[in-house]
Structure formats: C-alpha cells, structure tokens
Image (cartoon, helix red, strand yellow):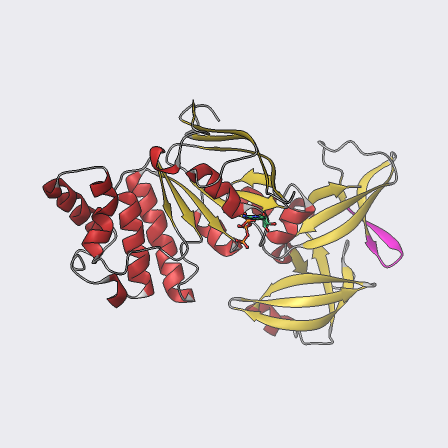
C-alpha cells in the first residue's frame, strides 16, 4: 500500500516470563480505512491495539504513522484515540464534561470546547443528552458518548477494542451500521478489535485474521470468504467444508475428491498450483456451494441427511457420505420440492468453480 496511514513493521511482543504475545506482525492501514483485527481469544488482538495506542511497548519492530516512527512516543503524544470495551467514561461527570475532558487537557478555551462537544453529540445522535449523567444512560447511549469523546479530539486514527460487545444482539447490529456510517462520514481510519466474525465481515473494509500472535491473512471480507489463504482462516470465517482431494498423476489434470475409498474427479488443478503426483490438497467449500442434484446425473454423490437446522431463508443440512460429513445449505423452497427430511438420501454436486484449494500437504 503506498502512503499508508499506519504501518506495523515486524512487531514482536514477549511478555515478562517469556510468553509470546506477538510474533512479527506486519500490517498497513490506509487513510480512511476501516480495518478489523479478528481472531480467537488470546491470539494477540488487544496487544496489537495497545501497541498502536502506545499503552504497551513492543519488544521488537516499529510503529509508523504517516511515515513517521512513533514507537517511542507516549500514548498521549500520539494522534490516536481509543474507545475501550467498557467505555471508561467518568461516572462523576455529565456527558458534556466527559466529552470535553480530552479537550481541556489540551487547554482549549471553554467556548470552543463546548462548540466541539455539541458537534460531537450531534454526530452520534445524542444532541439532547449533554447535561445527562452517564449513569442514567443505556448501554447504547454510553457507547455513543464514548465514541463522541474519542472523536472530538479529531484523531487521525481511532482504535476500538470490542466496542459493541456489551450491547444486546439487535442494538449491536444497529450500532454496527451506525459505526460504519460515522466512519465513512468522518473519513477517519478505524482499527477495531473483535472476535465476532459476522461483525467484522459486515463492518470492515479489510480484516486482518490473527492466530497465535501472527496475522494469517489480511483481505477484504469477500476475499476472506471466497479465497481463504489457510485452513485456519477457512474454518474461522463462516462455516466451511474442508474436503480432502488428491492430484493423482500427470495424465489426468483433475483433482479427485475422496468418497469412502473412491476418488472422484471434481475440478481441474488451478493454474497457480504446481503439484507433484500424489499430492493431497484440502479444498474449502461453503455450504451454499454444494447443490442438490438429480440422482445418477454426472458428478453426483449420494449422502444421507443426519440433521437439519433452521437458517432463515435456507436450511443447513448435515450430510453423511462415505465416512465423512458435509454442511449443505438448501433454500427452504427446495426442501419442500425434494422431501428433505432427516434420514433421507440426498444426491448432491459440488460446484467446481466455488472450490478453493487452501492447503497443500
Ligand atoms: P481476547 O479476545 O481474549 O481479549 P486477544 O486476542 O486480545 O484475546 P491478547 O490479550 O492480546 O489476546 O493476548 C495475547 C497473548 O498474550 C495471550 O496469550 C495472553 O495471555 C498474553 N498476554 C497478554 N497480556 C499479557 C501480560 N500483561 N502478561 C503476560 N501475558 C500477556
């Protein structure tokens, strides 16, 4: 990325006692970009955010902002603000005083402070709450005040640590779109920590998927979903079938998919893979890319429906075939037509264009 706003260059973190928190993190965030750090508990998301904010010093590597090395700068000297998981509002101050706090530290005149606080409250949709005590606000309102307090200082970069985790499901979804709208309106770059893949996929321009102190893949939501770069990413983002396949010999350019002890041809080896005969490949395949088909038509496999779960417009079937299982999504209308019930036989086909080779072993 040319002219990135934030650049993490080989960031490592070893905690006292020898625990590895981060192992060579490299990441770039563009001006006005919304990037999420996504991964399971303990993968290093918060440590990465704290290092960007300046609350934690890296053991190795550099943090660059607009090309300037800020690794040694203290937190309050960085043009970066953080919204914490618990909002960290001051309970003894009203909403306006909370928002003005950062501005008074900068010795801004009170008239100007008041004007900016008013603007920030309008931005987050709480123009009438300036004099309210924060203890009288709902979770969603506190979240907005925390955002207003962080944004009023006009940071170049806003860091958010699980900002919506305290909200119930419906308010959370509403705040996700609010957050995205606000971010695009302001043009400020946001880096958000979340362990919720649905949240990251719906809100982010790009997502950095982390695992065990490393970044496994940085990409747009669509690329992560359609072209996961590793087995970990494929299984962490959405529901994925990981299917074993083999490239048998040079005369046959197709990958073969294992059903019991048989190998069925399913797709041509992608041009970018140069495989030795006998190489095993894992194919990632989404449940919606496995389709029901007519029995005995070419490239059809037979399985048995083990369970059915409701997923709104579609049903998710757990299908046993050979000694393996697959997740298959079928539209609810198709179910009625095809008499899909638990225990029934199901003929299905894999869409070759939807398969993504993720691991060559
Ligand atoms: P969560 O989603 O649970 O908050 P996370 O992805 O944010 O997890 P971190 O909090 O960054 O993960 O922690 C990464 C690793 O570093 C973990 O193994 C954690 O135990 C370790 N760690 C974090 N802070 C410290 C510390 N102050 N001292 C020792 N180890 C730490």
Q: Is residue 155 left or right of residue 64?
A: left
| Magenta segment, prevailing SS (helix, strand or loop) | strand
Across and down, in percent, residue 123 comes to 23, 49
Q: Is residue 132 visible?
A: yes
Residue lying at 22% horizontally and 56% vertically, measured from the top left: 95
Across and down, in percent, residue 342 comes to 69, 76
Q: Is residue 79 visible?
A: no
What range of the chain is rendered magenta? 258-266
In terms of image quadrants, where is residue 68? top left
In terms of image quadrants, where is residue 183? top left
Q: Residue lying furthest left in this view?
A: 111
Q: Residue lying furthest front in this view?
A: 17
Q: Is residue 201 left or right of residue 265?
A: left
Q: Is residue 267 left or right of residue 28?
A: right
Residue lying at 34% horizontally and 37% vertically, measured from the top left: 76
Magenta stretch encompasses residue 238: no
In the image, 174 versus 61, the foreground residue is 61
Residue lying at 18% horizontally and 59% vertically, measured from the top left: 129
Residue lying at 29% horizontally and 44% vertically, measured from the top left: 151
In the image, 32 versus 102, the foreground residue is 102
Across and down, in percent, residue 26 comes to 56, 32
Magenta stretch encompasses residue 261: yes
In terms of image quadrants, where is residue 275? top right
Q: Is residue 353 above or below residue 66?
A: below
């Amino acid at each position: 990325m040319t002219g990135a706003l934030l650049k993490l260059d080989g960031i490592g973190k070893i905690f006292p006692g020898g625990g590895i928190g981060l192992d060579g993190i490299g990441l770039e965030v563009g001006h006005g970009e919304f990037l999420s750090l996504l991964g399971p508990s303990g993968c290093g998301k918060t440590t990465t955010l704290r290092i960007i904010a300046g609350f934690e010093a890296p053991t190795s590597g550099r943090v660059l902002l607009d090309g300037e090395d800020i690794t040694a700068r203290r937190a309050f000297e960085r043009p970066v603000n953080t919204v914490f998981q618990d909002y960290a509002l001051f309970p003894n101050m009203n909403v306006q005083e909370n928002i003005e706090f950062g501005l008074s530290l900068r010795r801004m005149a009170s008239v100007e402070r008041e004007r900016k606080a008013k603007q920030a409250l309008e931005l987050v949709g709480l123009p009438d709450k300036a004099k309210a005590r924060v203890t009288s606000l709902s979770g969603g309102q506190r979240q907005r005040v925390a955002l207003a307090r962080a944004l009023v200082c006009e940071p170049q970069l806003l860091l958010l640590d699980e900002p919506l985790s305290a909200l119930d499901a419906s308010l959370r979804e509403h705040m996700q779109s609010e957050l995205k709208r606000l971010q695009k309106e302001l043009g400020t770059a946001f880096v958000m920590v979340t362990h919720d893949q649905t949240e990251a996929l719906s809100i982010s321009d790009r997502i950095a998927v982390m695992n065990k102190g490393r970044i496994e893949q940085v990409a747009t939501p669509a690329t992560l979903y359609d072209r996961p770069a590793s087995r970990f990413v494929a299984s962490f983002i959405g529901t994925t079938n990981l299917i074993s396949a083999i490239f048998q010999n040079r005369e046959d350019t197709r990958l073969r998919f294992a059903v019991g002890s048989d190998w069925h041809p399913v797709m041509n080896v992608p041009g970018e893979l140069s495989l030795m005969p006998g190489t095993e490949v894992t194919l990632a395949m989404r449940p919606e890319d496995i389709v029901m088909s007519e029995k005995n038509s070419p490239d059809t496999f037979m399985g048995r429906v083990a369970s059915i779960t409701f997923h709104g417009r579609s049903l998710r079937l757990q299908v046993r075939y050979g000694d393996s299982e697959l997740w298959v999504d079928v539209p609810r209308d198709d179910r009625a037509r095809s008499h899909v019930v638990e225990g029934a036989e199901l003929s299905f086909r894999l869409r070759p264009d939807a398969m993504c080779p993720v691991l060559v072993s």
